[in-house]
Image: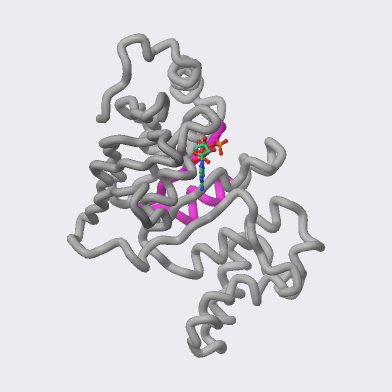
Amino acid sequence: MRLSDAALQYGGVRLFDGLALTLPAGRTTALLGPSGVGKSTLLRLIAGLEAGDHARATVTCDDGRPLTGRVAYLAQRDSLLPWAGALDNVALGARLRGEPMGPARARAAALLAEVGLGDRLTARPGTLSGGMRQRVALARALMEDRPVILMDEPFSALDFLTRLRLQDLTARLLAGRTVLLVTHDPLEALRLGDAVHVLHGRPATLDAPLTPPGAPPREAVDPAVLALQAEVLRRLTGEDHAGGGGAP
Ligand SMILES: Nc1ncnc2c1ncn2[C@@H]1O[C@H](COP(=O)(O)OP(=O)(O)OP(=O)(O)O)[C@@H](O)[C@H]1O
């Protein structure tokens, strides 16, 4: 999938102007960048949620079909319905679309079992830990069975070890999908990303991606991951930007 000629401004401030980004099919692309550079806005632009005169973008899918209706979204806040149990939250989309609820509930239960919550089907979000809630949200995103998944800092509110476990689970369950992962965490980007981009500047530009070797999830202590972390930090802190970064 390719985003090209992306331009967006808020109140005269140009966040993007001619930005391009390729998301290789079946791979995870990680996107890092300083706070406020426009990472979440870029996700919304790709998802078609920034309609209006202030924004434009061309999204081209590899199969030539439009992206509309083929994207799932996983946000930092799980946005689960507080009054509904885990299974009902996962099956919500099917209910809203009027699908037969028998098969939908069976599939939701199977997905919750896959994320390790098979014994918490009726638990309401308020009774679950932050990591468990994000696992419910992950199951809900998988329930939609969309080929493209946009993830906006999905694990940032979690403690380090819970985050590592959810990264492992995500890598396993999202293998083969086209994923764009926005994160603040260089280690997360390098564990999960097949390509790791840093977005910087205004209007924002992208560096040529880093491509960590091996398949996700990479070990946190993998020497290649550790070495690339230093490079990511250099890019994030702007040490590499003296000449300005261009679109890849
Ligand atoms: N609806 C909006 N109206 C006006 N300005 C907005 C709107 N949404 C975002 N912005 C501004 O656009 C800029 C980019 O915001 P965005 O949330 O995309 O950044 P980000 O890189 O995701 O930041 P963070 O890492 O802190 O989440 C910010 O300056 C923000 O204030």
- From where the camera sits, is residue 212 visible? no
Q: Residue at x 64, y 60 (%)?
A: 79
Is 19 above or below relative to 201? below
Q: Is residue 94 magenta?
A: no
In the picture, the quarter occupied by the C terminus is top left
- Whole-percent x and y of residue 1? 26, 50
Give the side of residue 8 with respect to residue 141, left or right: left
Q: Depth check: 51 or 173 in front? A: 51
Q: Residue at x 24, y 56 (%)?
A: 61
- Whole-percent x and y of residue 131? 69, 51
Q: Is residue 168 magenta?
A: yes
Is 169 above or below relative to 191? below
- Residue at the right extreme? 127
Q: Depth check: 4 or 218 in front? A: 4
- Whole-percent x and y of residue 206? 34, 29
Quarter of the image for residue 78 reads: bottom right
Give the side of residue 129 with respect to residue 199, left or right: right
Report the magenta residues as a range.
167-185
Quarter of the image for residue 35 reads: top right
Query: In the rendered view, how is the structure colored?
Result: one colour
